[in-house]
Amino acid sequence: MTIMNWASLALAIIAIVTAFAGTIRWMVKHYLYELRPNGGGSLKDQVNRLERRLDEVIDMLIDHKR
């Protein structure tokens, strides 16, 4: 193989690795965005609402047994 072939192979590998790393970074960024509260639409907000409702149900059950 000539120097040009090695250089093009190296550049192709670098391009593939860079594209893969960029894709992973984009995915992580968007998944982490869902874990921040944003006023009602994020996964974090939904989990917080469910926890509050569950606490209310548990309090109602405890009060009902007394």
Image: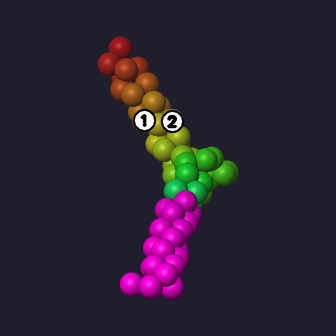
Residue tagged by mark 1?
A: 54
Q: How is the image coloured?
A: rainbow
Image marks 1 and 2: residues in contact by CB distance under 8 Å? yes
Q: Residue at x 66, y 51 (%)?
A: 38
Residue 6 lies left or right of residue 37; in this view the side is left
Q: Is residue 3 magenta?
A: yes
Residue segment shown in magenta = 1-27
Q: Residue at x 52, y 56 (%)?
A: 28
**Quarter of the figure that contains the C terminus:** top left
Report whether residue 27 is seen.
Answer: no
Depicted 63 relative to depicted 25: above or below = above
Residue tagged by mark 2?
A: 52
In the rendering, at what x and y percent does residue 29 appear? 58, 57
Q: Which amino acid, by three-letter code, is at mark 2?
A: Arg
Depicted 63 relative to depicted 43: above or below = above
**Quarter of the figure that contains the N terminus:** bottom left
Residue 29 lies left or right of residue 39; in this view the side is left
Q: Which amino acid, by three-letter code, is at mark 1?
A: Leu
Q: Quadrant of residue 42?
A: bottom right
In the rendering, at what x and y percent does residue 23 appear? 51, 68
Q: CA distance from mark 1 to mark 2?
A: 5 Å
Q: Is residue 56 magenta?
A: no
Residue 56 lies left or right of residue 22; in this view the side is left
Q: Residue at x 55, y 52 (%)?
A: 32
In the rendering, at what x and y percent does residue 44 appear? 54, 46
Report whether residue 3 is seen.
Answer: yes
